[in-house]
Image: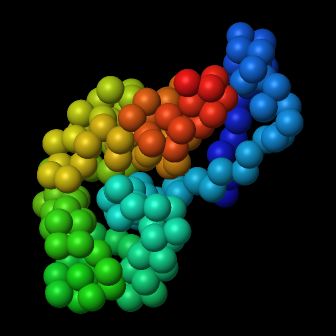
Amino acid sequence: MHFAYDERAVGYLARRDKRLGEVMERLGPLRREVMPDLFAALVHAIVGQQVSMTVQRTLWQRLCARLGEVTPSSVLAVAPEELRALGLSGRKVEYVREAAQAVTDGRLDVEALREMDDAAVCAALVGLRGVGVWTAEMLLLFSLQRQDVLSYDDLAIRRGLRMLYRH
């Protein structure tokens, strides 16, 4: 499944910012994968915090291979030491397990996130230990397909903007 772009919004951006519009024209539409399972997406975002995409991909493949399906029950069924052995830091193991426990005991209803506005989604997720605004924004973008989210604190976005505007 890939991100469904709002063509009107894409056209608007291209008209509002000529430099950005030129890059969009040159690159064409980007195929961004969407992770529709919100719990798995949350774990994926936590795994990807402050690591390269290559490291995230490797860790995610290991986690999926070990768990089969990334669910709250599959996460909680594996000992923390086993998760650490996959390459996750001790902190990330804590955060992933605490997120799984929050879903299991009803403190976090991941399906309810679909109906919430962006601010409410961020507030619900930031209430979890180890989940900040960046992680919540990744869920908004890569799972909920929110068209109007820009993660200003994302290092890759900042680098791209610097390259584009030579700042």
- Residue 84: name its quadrant: bottom left
Q: Residue at the location (35% across, 56% down)? A: 50
Q: Residue at the location (17% across, 66% down)? A: 91
Nearer the observer, 61 or 164: 164
Asked if residue 51 is positioned above or below residue 31 in the image, the reply reads below
Q: Quadrant of the N terminus?
A: bottom right
- Residue 75: name its quadrant: bottom left
Quick one: which residue is furthest to the front in this view? 167
Asked whether residue 111 is in view, the answer is yes
Nearer the observer, 104 or 44: 44
Q: Is residue 19 left or right of residue 138?
A: right
Residue 85: give x, y in percent of width and height.
Answer: 27, 88
Q: Quadrant of the C terminus?
A: top right
Residue 164: give x, y in percent of width and height.
Answer: 66, 29
Q: How is the image coloured?
A: rainbow
Residue 140: give x, y in percent of width and height.
Answer: 45, 40
Q: Residue at the location (63% across, 56% down)? A: 33
Asked if residue 107 is positioned above or below residue 5 in the image, the reply reads below
Asked if residue 158 is positioned above or below residue 142 in the image, the reply reads above
